[in-house]
Amino acid sequence: MAIVELKDVSRVYRNGDHEQYALNHVNLALDEGKFVVVLGPSGAGKSTLLNLLGGLDNPTSGTILVDGKDISTLKDDEMADYRAAKVGFVFQSYNLIPTLTVQENVALVKEIAPHPLSSHDMIAAVGLADHVHHFPSELSGGEQQRVSIARALAKNPKILLCDEPTGALDSETGVMVLKLLLSMAREMGKTIIIVTHNQQIAKMADTVVRVKNGRVVSCENQENPLTAEEVEW
Amino acid sequence: MLRRKLFRTMLRYKAQFISMIIMIALGVGVFIGFNMEWYSLEVDTNEIFEATGFADYRIFSEAGFTKADLEKILAIDGVEDATRYLSVNTTVQGDTDVIALTVNENMNVSGLLLMAGEPYDPESQDGIWLSDQYAEKNGVSVGDELTLTYKLLSLKGTVKGLVKSSEYMICIPDETQLMPDYTSYGFAFISPAMLKKAIFFEFYAQINVRTGMEKAEFVAAAEETLSKTTLILGKDETVSWAETQGEIEEGKTMGSILPVLFLAIAVLTMVTTMHRITANEKTQIGTLKALGFHNRRIITHYTVYALTIGIIGSLLGVGLGYLLGWYILSPGGAMATYIDLPSWALHTPLFCWAVLGFILIFLTLIGFLSVRKMLAGTAADALRPYTPRKMRHLAIEETKLFKSLDFGSKWNLRDSLRHKSRSFMTLFGIIGCMILLVGGLGMKDTMDAFIESFYNQSIRYENRVNLDTESVTNEEAETLAAEYQGDWSAIASVQLGDAPASLEVYHITQDLVRFPDEGTGYIELNDEGAWVCARIAKKHQLQAGDSIAVSPYGSDESYTLRVAGVTRAMTESIVMTDAYARSVGYDYQINTIYTRETQIEANKHILNAQSKQAIMDSFDTFMELMNVMVFLLVVAAVVLGVVVLYNLGVMSYTERYREMATLKVLGFKDRKIGRLLISQNLWLTVIGVVIGLFAGWGVLKYLLEALAGEYELILVIGPVTYLVSILLTFGVSLIVGLMVARKNKHIDMVAALKTEE
């Protein structure tokens, strides 16, 4: 069953008289519990797609159904509720709150998520139990990204959205983070959508969506995706 | 091209740009305004003192001075000039108005300034040169006839000219009245010829002297040549001189506290804001450097930015200062209701311009240092965005209390500590706001309490009747007092140490006069001793049980009095009962009766009567001035609060933009994020308000101590003042917080989180 469904979705940016289609009449359906990689060059529209799914932006036209609910016409507050309940975000630049410790950054979601998980368990799961009282600035990039994964999953969302999650990391750390992300999400039955221009990551995906010039060029399911170890980095 | 960027930078940080200009304008304005106030007063009053030959000493004799006495005084080595002088209170016929009628033989000393009409003529047989202020308030013009009566004598004359005089620069009948009231009291000059024609002989109770001699030296010389102890008052014992000097001192005090507060806030705002702006522009600064711009040009660019703010702010500030100065010192200004001057010119002390120049240099330096910090190192270093200080763990984090705090409180607490300068400035702004409110409103409370205890509660009579001491005996006075069911007093000038004081003997049976104690109560006079006023007690370091020796002027007797306690009074005075006076052998002369009667019938023993209403009315202008001042301080407090808090609020918003975007992405609602922002402001406000309450109290205390030479005030701050100050400060903080929090809606999550840190 499709957890995400885009029907004729467009996102148009107006710049004076000039209209630019970041997404141009896109139709797409993604199944629950799958690992989806959205591939495409810079400016193809993949981040726009992710922002629409994440409830950070509204489409100019079309309908987006997430878990059976139309999110394309939600008001600001409803969008906030949606973000709090349904989706977790992992960014290339971590976006942790610098004045909160690891533990507090993760526990933050208790304030908003309807069914949060234990922040202690999540931090332990990403292997940072020894660092709970550290501030983000005291951690390495990989460790910070692990905190942000713990925070995203602590909300107990249905979908995990990742925007170039390994973009700022060296390849070794990147692989480690990716492995962690996948194993945890799979174990917990989450749908993962990663946006990247890294072709190698696509080899691990259940579904690969290729985007170009604001259109979905292809959406293919892979029968036997590789594991992180099998991919040549 | 860089110039174009400069304008865009101003536009981009318009809130900061405008608030820095406002703060500097306020600081400079208050600084220039207050200093201009006292300095102009000094220059303008000196002008009239010089132009009219204001006397340095006044020698008094009830018996009057002869021509020979004057010659003796003129013969003293060091005396420049002198005149025989007479001033008596006369009543305008057909009215209750009182005119201080003045005769002066030599207009080079204690003379007058002609404002309209004919010049003064010493031979004139019927000419009256009348106070122009009195003339204006009472519709009298040149050519009008005026009849003045003194006891059974009446003097009829024609108003020849309208004049001002430095001797009557603050035209009040005595020190019980705070403000001049020209509708009922004025002064006039007539020629010696007219006086002689009216009373058939010469009588001058005063010799006014111009000299550069020290008081002790002059008193010794005068007493020797006149061969008797006489009351000699220096110019610092006259109302005109002492009160204006008091105003000048007061202005200097005000000119040092308030401007320092405003200027400090302005400079600190500038420091924090310039730092933030250059920090925010660090990548642009780096780009310029990477493009090949020399450091010098980039530094000049931002330095010019700071200088521009300084110049615009200073120009507006000077304008504001002049406006403030003009508001106080102009023919229609606040001070003109108090002091009667021929011209009100505004003068700024030279050091103000020097300070202003220094401020401009300092502001430029702030710009210079801010940008230089961002330019440090290689072009690559400069290109890297500014990173705030790393988070450090705090000792309080180990406490249970901290651990039990919710996320928002932790976030806000750490953020405040991380951005110390911003939090400190916020605190400073709130404290400043509180100081102005508590100080301004507290000043009014204090003055209200002062008037309540000194006048409303102490003056319980309807009329104060002045007796003619030349004709009345003590028995007659007592009989008269009994007829009016009144109390009586005998007030005389005595010498205490080397200064004059008022010795006041009271016979109180009707409770018509009361004497405020050092707190809020009243003293019950008894026959055990005399009470000295707070200023005398302080000057001579007196307390109950001590002894003082006083000597009435014109006599060689000296009396030793036991100090029974300290009272608060308008004039420097010593009060005691008639029984105690008799017990020390003091021979008093009753000269005042206090009564509840509203109608005082003409009687040969009665000179005139002064009603409580007339005294109370004289406060109206004073209280109006007070209200205006308090209003201005409240406005200044609100402006200060809004500008400082808004500027810092926007700064905080910009700095936490990314964090707020993160919260928003996580699913926090705008309202909740707004509440977080506001609660930080409110916490700082709570701390600022508490400190501000004490600071406001302290500033007021300091001001009152500076005024202690003039008034015996006690600090009173009413609950309403505290309440209004606290509510207003919280109100300002909350409204500014809401203004800033409203911006949350426009956080662009996508853009904010894309930008690399």
Image: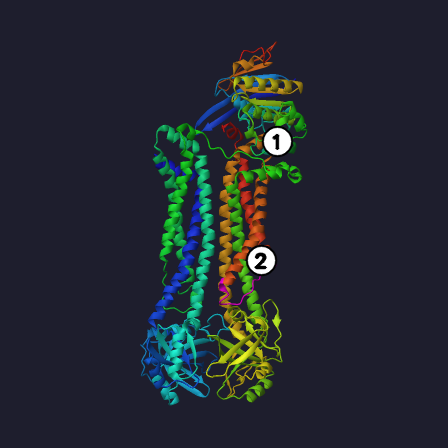
- Asked if marks 2 and 1 fall on the same chain, the answer is no
Q: Which residue lies at the image location 46% right of the left edge and 38% below the top edge?
A: B276
Q: Residues within 10 Å of mark 1 (few under 14, many from 20)?
A: some
Residue B350 position, x and y percent, is 35, 56
Q: Determine the image quadrant of residue B407.
A: top right
Q: Secondary structure at mark 2?
A: helix
Structure colour scheme: rainbow
Disc 1 target residue: A133
Query: Which-is-in-front pick, marks 2 and 1?
Result: 1
Chain under numbered label 1: A
Lateral position of residue B237 relative to residue B392, left or right: left
Q: State yes or no: residue B718 in magenta.
A: yes
Residue B386 position, x and y percent, is 47, 33
Residue situated in front as seen by the camera: B399 or B133:
B399
- Residue type at mark 1? His
For residue B154, above or below residue B547: below
Majority secondary structure in the magenta region: loop
Residue B581 position, x and y percent, is 57, 82
Q: Which residue lies at the image location 58% right of the left edge and 86% below the top edge?
A: B478
Chain under numbered label 2: B
Pointer 2 with pointer 1, Cβ within 8 A: no
Lateral position of residue B225 relative to residue B516, left or right: left
Residue situated in front as seen by the camera: B144 or B301:
B301
Start-end of magenta stretch: B706-721
For residue B685, above or below residue A211: below
Residue B432 position, x and y percent, is 51, 51
Q: State yes or no: residue B444 in magenta.
A: no
Lateral position of residue B39 relative to residue B414, left or right: left
- Residue type at mark 2? Thr
Say which quadrant the N terminus of chain B sits in: top left
Disc 2 target residue: B721
